[in-house]
Amino acid sequence: MPSSPISTYKPAPNLLRERTVLVTGAGDGIGKAAATAFASYGANVVLLGRTRSKLEAVSDQIREETETDPLIVPVDLALLAEEGCTQLEESIRSVYERLDGILHNASILGPMVPIQHYSYEQWVQVFQVNVHAQFLLTKTLLPLLTESQDASIILTSSGVGRKGRAYWGAYAASKFATEALMEVLADEVASTSNIRVNSLNPGGTRTAMRASAFPAEDPMSLPTPSDHMPLYLYLMGPDSIGINGQKVDAHSWQYTDSRQ
């Protein structure tokens, strides 16, 4: 995998042509940028998010700018259960007959308070959205992904999912769990399928979540979600075949092998 700047990667115009990719948290921020980028390179995208109006706006933009046909799936991941995942699998199979990738982008920050003052209800909610929902979605959709000639799963991590920091509570713990899920799944699929699984830490990015976590920070000092898209395209597309079980950092485009 390249260690050079992101800007040096030039995806082919048809990189994701005839592929289907699910993006969670697709209504805004990095999810919106990724969904539109994947579509602009040919993918049919499944837009999963909590707010229908946001998903419809992203879908309208994609329909206007590309020849692809998005599928809108309004889902509150805090309430996601196995039945909903099964229905999603059936919808994807019915509409597209295939699934070639998942970007697990959706997550919530939760309160930034000491562990002593963290409520159990809020802790459980953060883990439901950030960990349990992506487990359920992945588990249910794996059979469909195995039918792809090469499929990619990207789990969104964080710097505090690799080194914990005070007051980041359930968010940090959930991202450590995300890294563990990536490592386990990547090891399982390494010799049994054409699926590759990696985690991606976008780092400080100009998003609403970042502004909530760092209200005094100048957002103009941060890269935009679109600035990261070459790396997202690389990991989602066939150019990254063979890259599996890696912890990728968007700001340096470097990785460490979690299996060493």
Image (cartoon, grey):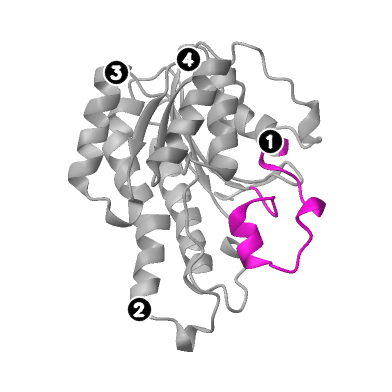
Q: Amino acid at mark 3?
A: Val
Residue 145 x %, y %: 35, 27
Residue picked out by circle 3: 95
Residue picked out by circle 1: 226
Q: Amino acid at mark 2?
A: Tyr
Start-end of magenta stretch: 202-227
Cβ atoms under marks 3 and 2 closer than 8 Å: no
Residue 139 x %, y %: 29, 42
Q: In what element is the residue under mark 3?
A: helix
CA gap between label 1 and label 3 equals: 28 Å
CA gap between label 2 and label 1 equals: 35 Å
Name the residue located 77 percent from the left edge and 37 percent from the top edge: 3
Q: Amino acid at mark 1?
A: Ser
Which of the two discs, 4 and 2, labels the residue nearer the N terminus? 4
Residue 87 x %, y %: 21, 35
Residue picked out by circle 4: 68
Question: Between tags 4 and 2, which lies in front?
Answer: 4
